[in-house]
Amino acid sequence: MPLDRTACDELDRSADRLDGFDALRARFAPGAPGALYFDANSIGPMPHDAPERMRRVLDEGWRLARRRGWNDFDWLEQPRSLGAAIAPVLGAGPDDVLVADSTSVNLYKLLRTALAARAPRKVIVVERDVFPSNRYVAEGIAQAGMATLRLIDRPDDLAAALAPGDVAVVSLSHVDYRSSERLDMSVLSAQIRAGGALSLWDLSHSVGAVAIHLQADGADLATGCGYKYLSGGPGAPSFIYLNPRLRETVNSRLRETAWPALCGWMGHADTFAFEPGYRPAPDVSQFQVGTPPVLANAAFSAAAEIWRDVDAAALTARHRSLTDTLIALLDEHCEGFGLHLASSRDHARRGGHVALRFEGAAALAQALVAAGVVLSARKPDSLRFGVHPLTTTHGDLHEAVQRLQTVLQTAAWREPRFAGASV
């Protein structure tokens, strides 16, 4: 049966009545009139009250309270309170997640932590074609002589990589940033653990789009972006996860070496004791380094309050409905134009975005932006629809595919103005 606009609108009415997504959607600010946004895999939508939260920090906190702001507001507690708020969509305990720093910095901290916890093992395993920053961080640690880097082409190569018995940590991206291929966290974490190593997961392209079960799936360490589907704002802080069963292992190693990857006063066991020697906090707080970014955390807090009310299972069900509908619409309306589905048709193997292969993906993405469909492309030929399950509607999908069909039929994407480089 064809998916016309009426059918898509009925899907929206049914889903909203069932799971209350209309109320959740209303907590986000609308974008530009007529624009359709599919860039949540780059930057998520803005919560309505984010500007007001930042205004309060600037006015009541900075202008009026100044130094008293640290005591009068929850600025020092935000790394923990924000972590607790997003913990349910990570499948983690409220005391096991911290919001701090960037994903790259957190990858560095976690890789160094894993090396210390699994000494004398010194090998880091990384996917060859993972997002560049993930590989760069590992390469930098290896270049400094602290580890050896072992690259794999695909998860099927893990058994061979683990076989020598010298691997300390395997760093994997839960979802590929180009194809949106989602890995089986439970199976791979068990395989890595059986090989005597720790698993480190980058959740940037899955958290906030689909349910994640870090603790149940046996993940040891994790991090991910706060500014994509989580909607924490441009350049929002990242988050960091430490499996509670690792606390004693990690802490015993820290007691032996006395030095975690980065030692800062906020990661001290007693921050305001101002002791001359460093003692790491006994939990995930040890990964906090410097003073929290108060303004950035204020924006993040607006999104965190929304995520606190989101049912993870319902989130996944809505994302499945949306992305399955998008694929069906693409099949129906865009066949024969050189577009090929790069993502899996199986939702369990698909991350936040739906990826297509197209020879002129970069130019097509810019032509679609000009047509009011905001999405992204990645080299060499990936076109990415970043569907946000809390704000995207089935009706949005139908309209976007209609505009895509028009751009393809008219070959508008071939115009010279769309040939330039884009983010």
Image (cartoon, helix red, strand yellow):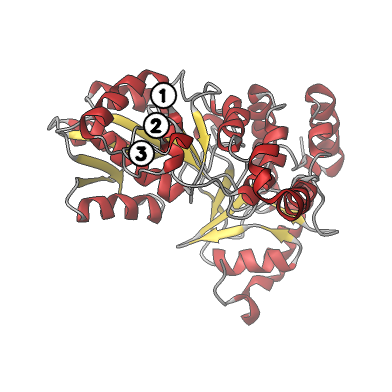
- The answer to whether residue 40 of the structure is visible from this angle is no
User: Which residue in the protein does label 2 denote?
Assistant: 221
Q: CA distance from mark 3 to mark 1?
A: 12 Å
Please state which of residues 302 and 152 is positioned toward the viewer in this rendering. 302
Q: Residues within 10 Å of mark 2 (few under 14, many from 20)?
A: many
Q: Is 363 above or below relative to 70? A: below
Q: Given contact means CB atoms under 8 Å apart, are the residues at marks 2 and 3 in contact? A: yes
User: Which residue in the protein does label 3 denote?
Assistant: 110
> Image quadrant of residue 58?
bottom right
Q: Identify residue type, mark 1.
A: Asn
Mark 3 or 1, nearer chain start: 3
Could you tell whether 141 is left or right of 41 in the image?
A: left
> Image quadrant of residue 417?
bottom right
**Residue name at image x 19 percent, y 40 percent:** 123
Q: Given contact means CB atoms under 8 Å apart, are the residues at marks 1 and 2 in contact? A: yes
Q: Residue furthest left?
A: 164
Mark 2 or 3, nearer chain start: 3
Image location of residue 201, percent across then percent down: 41, 36
Q: Identify residue type, mark 2.
A: Leu
Please state which of residues 299 and 392 is positioned toward the viewer in this rendering. 299
